[in-house]
Image (cartoon, rainbow, N blue to C red):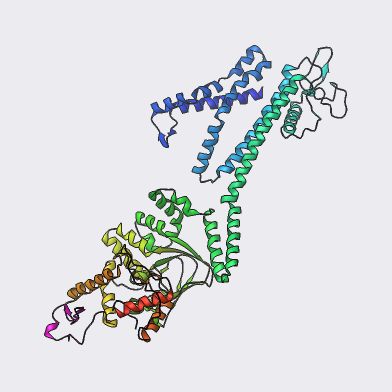
Amino acid sequence: MKYLVIDFIIDVFFMIDVYFRYKCFPVIKNGSVVIDTQEIRQLYQRGRMAIDVISCIPLELLAFVWGQEYTFILRLIHLARVFQLPTYFAMTDHYLNLWNIRISAATSLLFRMFFYYVIVNHWCGCAWFAIHRYMERNIMYTWATVDCPGNFELAGHGCLAVWDDDLGYHNICDGGNMRRCYIRSVYFVITTISTVGYGDIAPVTEIETIWENVVVLIGACIFAGIIGAFTAYLSQIDTSGSTAFRTKLQKLQEYMKYRNLPDDLQTQILAYHQERWNRSQIIDERAVMNILPIPLQMDLSYAVLKRVIFKIPILKSCTAIVRERIAHALNLQVCPSSSTIYNVGDIGWDIYFIGSGLIEVILTTDTSVLDAVGKSNAYRLKQKADSCGLLYRIGNHFGETCLLSQSGVRQETTVARTLCELYLLPKSKLEEIWSYMAIDESRKFRNDLLNRNGNTWHSFDAFNDIDDDFDYEESSIREFGYGVESQETPLNSPSSSPASSTRSNGSTFVNWSSPKSTRYSVIHSQKNNRRSRLCIPRAEEKVRLKSFSAESAKEAMRLQKNGGRKRSVPRVSSISENSECNEPHTAQSAAIEIQRLVSAGEFTIP
């Protein structure tokens, strides 16, 4: 009787569930949430409402009229709820995702198949016992009456059920021990489905044999599903789980060993992949993001890197949309301890933001590998070192001098003193972000990058637009002679009033005694002419030196000292048919290109 009370409580729960589903529970249709009451009712009526209502009818109440022996049959109507199991599983996956509990599809499938396996064993065991209880009551020998452990007499005491000659039927379970009968029934089903079949419990009558055949067929289908679920689970581990990651590292190590790469480079590569795996638990994070539209990619990137961005004061002070664009443009680089990030004279167009670890900055005293802007910028680097020190930590950034340079020549050496997590922001991406910002906002952001590091201000210079860094250009022109003809045009000469003059060969030079605003326009006119001759996009400012290294610059200096004598190397300064510049690919050809630019007065190496 106590089981009927529990069953009634469950029926009441499902009735309340049906009522709320019909009245107010929102549903999802085509990816949208439906909250209109009338539409909710229509969708529920066309869906599973009929099955839900039928499964909630309390037919057990008729047992008080017909007798308790019919209770089992009357309760079979509740099996209609089984058809809702797939829906319940889908809802479970949905709520687990809302609670940020990650379960892969293969793992979920495996759990479902095990659940179905347990349920099928239970149902088949109950049916096996029901055959003995309801269909073979007046048969002396059944599977239960011959199940006599200890070699007891068949159908006698000690068996699962005992035959009564006087009554002409057997009892349900000897001693009323229903738990023992249920366990023996499920035991028979498990051994049959698993094809073990010990033989201690076997069918006796014809109907029992038929049911055993049905159980075997059901077991074959269930085991096929379980094997498929295991296959999907193991395949998922091999392609995207920890096993796949270990396989990837093993192939990578074999490749590095075959190429005989330096040990420090191998350490950097392995540390990078290990850190990426620890952070995302996925082999290719970009591949997952690329299937999303750009706005969702920005939201996802910001959600992943929000913790890092808020550690960097300069990025934290930006607006929300700018932070999202920056997060989408950042690239992770992991540097082991004592590894060199870049050397002075190398070419680079990235700004580095420190997410974790310590970075040491080493200033150079040899300016031979620096470009003109780097030499004129030396005092700012010294000022920055005096204010911020040479050891950077979380929240600091470095490499921002690429914003002032047209060649990308690095002006310092940076070394990781601990395991560091760096986030790279390319200059091209930064300029794209600035194009979406207001002029004052982008100018403030640029000034912060150049004058501030973390919460410390090291200078207070006002930098205008990217093309308007006139003071640095002018100082470079004064010092290294970009078009300057001071001997030809004395400062006090009457002819020095124009902002520019023309040489005998038709070229133009700057008159430095003219007003600054006038000289400004002349200088930038010369800059634009140099850009047009080099086929360089104005917004990029990368010239041909994008792929040059410090070795290339030294080679160019050697050629210049030798009087510009070139070796027989194919000319690399040709312009293709689509008017795009061909960049040099070797150190020597790059050096020849630099030497050509120096000869043309477009680049200077003292």
Q: Is residue 87 left or right of residue 364?
A: right
Q: Is residue 47 left or right of residue 60?
A: left
Residue 104 percent coordinates (x, y): 55, 45
Decide: is 293 above or below 159. below
Which quadrant of the view contains residue 24?
A: top left
Q: Main secondary structure of the magenta part?
A: loop
Magenta stretch holds residue 512: yes
Q: Determine the residue positioned at 26% across, 68% down.
A: 532
- Regarding residue 64, the answer to whether it shows in the image is yes
Q: Is residue 108 left or right of residue 355?
A: right
Decide: is 493 above or below 534. below
Question: Can you say which quadrant of the picture contains the C terminus?
Answer: bottom left
Could you say which is closer to the camera, residue 412 or residue 259? 259
- Regarding residue 411, the answer to whether it shows in the image is no
Q: Determine the residue positioned at 36% across, 77% down.
A: 594
Residue 251 percent coordinates (x, y): 59, 60
Residue 132 percent coordinates (x, y): 75, 20
Give the residue furthest to the left. 494
Give the tally of numbered discs: 0
Q: Is residue 499 left or right of residue 402?
A: left
* Chain part drawn in magenta: 487-513
Magenta stretch holds residue 463: no
Question: Can you say which quadrant of the picture contains the N terminus?
Answer: top right
Which quadrant of the view contains residue 429?
A: bottom left
Could you say which is closer to the camera, residue 450 or residue 509? 509
Residue 41 percent coordinates (x, y): 42, 25
Decide: is 247 above or below 269. above
Could you say which is closer to the camera, residue 284 or residue 177? 284
